[in-house]
Image (cartoon, coloured by chain):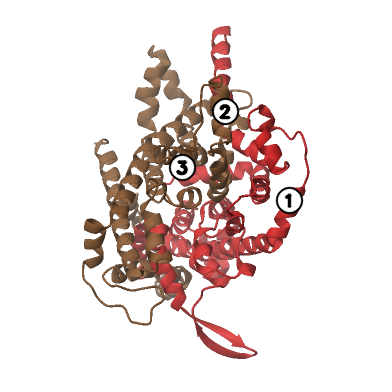
Amino acid sequence: MNAATAARRGWAYVPMTVLAAFFLFPIVFMVAASLKTDHQIFADMNSLRAFLPVGDLSLANYAAVFDRVPFWRFLGNTLFVTFMVTAFGLIVNSMCGYALARMRWKGRGLVFGLIITTLILPFDTTIVPMVYLVANLPWIGFDGLTPVLEFGWLNSYRVQIIPFIVNAFSIFLFAQYFKSLPKGLEEAAAIDGAGWLRTYWRIIVPLSKPVFATVAILTVVTSPATWNAYLWPLMTVQSEELRPVMVGVQYFFQLDTAWGEVMAYITMITVPMVIVFLVFQRAFIQSIASAGMKD
Amino acid sequence: MAAKLASRYPDSPTIEGAAATAAAPPQKRKRRSHSRAEQRAGTAFAVPGIVLLLVFVIGPAVVSLVLAFTNARLISPTPPEFIGLENFRRAFSEDATFHRSLFNTLLFACIVVPLQGGLGLVLALLVNQKLAGRNFFRTVFFLPVITSMVVVSLLWRFLYQEDGLVNSALSMLTGGAWAGQAWLANPSTALGAIVVMSVWQGVGFHMIIWLAGLQTIPEEVYEAGALDGTTPWQRFWHLTLPLLKPTFVFVLITITIAAMSLFVQVNIMTGGGPVGSTSTIVLQIVQKGFQQQQMGYGAALSLIFFCIVLTLALVQRRLTRDKDS
């Protein structure tokens, strides 16, 4: 590399640094402000001190968050729902994708057409009828040991989990991946006497770890029902002990907002995800990249 | 994406099947029973997905299609009545808030789609260079994507206040000349403020998509271009951009759908105000259909919204495809 190229490369750092500052400043401010009193936050606003943990620092805002909301309960709900949606989603969508990609059965073409059609249907378009629907769905509950037929799914975990297990895009990603696996895997397994389920579980799944990772990550990051769930639980879950973390922000909307507490709460619900991202960074980036390469 | 895949899709398993049959002709009888087992197994594998899809994706769409022609309410003692096109007449000829929302949503999409798509490409080009520390920059540009839109909206609501960080930064940069204003309380700046924070949050996602597209272009293409004595700009314009075409289509359609569905930011930051300047279609669907319990009317708005998004997606698809041939 000659000196001119090196110098030109060096110049690339100027826009990149400016952009990095633009992307980082709100997040740095959020964390710094969460440690300050409201008075201190506003006093620091006119200088670079706004981004620094300086002055009268304390964890008082964090303590206040625990007084205002049942944080651990919210976090537990979010983790539980996220886990269930992701785990069941991997099973249901991968099996459906497998049947579409590598098995011959009647109606397959129709089902595939249906899945492709729903790919462009944004979730928001059907949210209102969806509330109407889940409010009237049947469920078998238990009164002691006697099964009881009940109606209405509102205010439950199931309303936060079951509608979001199936995902057309996940099925599509699985089908694409399974099609790329070598032909004849099933025949070889059949000679050894393995049934379909066994073949799928013992041969296909171990060969397909990358696509399982991709779908799991995309589910956690982009599904409207996992870590970021907000509108749906806001509409369908009224009782406090079933609500997820994002809905918790509602508890901080007040006439005279305590901004220090707000900053502490949103820091608390952001940091876990950022840590997970930093640890699995390569997998995250690859998942999103592969989502765009499927056209 | 849809049509192309649907047409491409059904062939391969047939070929696969044919090859398998050809490879094992003596086992004809066994093969046939295997097929029946395959029919049963295939259906069993797909059924959970199909049922859930029918109930929770197709179901609500059908319910919406029916409710849109009724006066159904979320909780009501009287059963819904069929009222024909009344909801649509109301939406198009009476509901000024809906007109405003339609306009705001389209305006938002028209600004965000080129801005976020373009900035995403710029970021991708920057971090695609062989520079020390590019992984650090990639991570930083991507960080807001990991941050929930709920969190981002609350955070920026604070930054946009009259005594907030955005104003004090502008005041610092202009040496005190900037007077400062409450960005979200002013009808002429509120939507613009939401545009900026939406791009801030979402652009990292599309940077990664562009980057993946850039990395599929082999180095030799550029080397050949350089040998022909082209400038870097010519190479970008005549080599890089045409080769990024499939990525472009994906980015275009995904940003359009996301922009048209604008809701969380508005719900948390402005509630649609001031004076309707940030009200959007989805916000109206939720306010009318859910908060005001006019389920039928909300369903009608959903149907209108769906038709708009579908039309946009199909038009974009068609336009980008025509350029190809």
Residue at 36%, 53% in the rendered image: B281
Q: Nearer the viewer, residue B218 or A41?
A: A41
In three-dimensional space, the C-alpha distance between marks 2 and 3, rounded to whole angstroms, equals 19 Å
| Quarter of the rendering occupied by the N terminus of chain A | top right
Identify the amino acid type marked 2: Ala
Left or right of A281 on screen, residue B44: left
Is A233 rendered above or below residue B161? below
Q: Secondary structure at mark 3?
A: helix
The spot of residue B182 in percent (x, y) is: 49, 38
Which chain hosts label 3? B
Q: How many marks?
A: 3
Task: Judge if badges 2 and 3 mark residues of a common chain.
Answer: yes
Q: Which residue is mark 3?
A: B185
Q: Say if mark 2 contacts mark 3, CB within 8 Å.
A: no
Which chain hosts label 2? B
The spot of residue B150 in percent (x, y) is: 55, 50
Q: Secondary structure at mark 1?
A: helix
Q: Say if mark 1 contacts mark 3, CB within 8 Å.
A: no
The spot of residue B290 in percent (x, y) is: 42, 66
For chain B, the rendered hue is brown
For chain A, the rendered hue is red
Q: Which residue is mark 2?
A: B169
Q: Which residue is mark 1?
A: A62
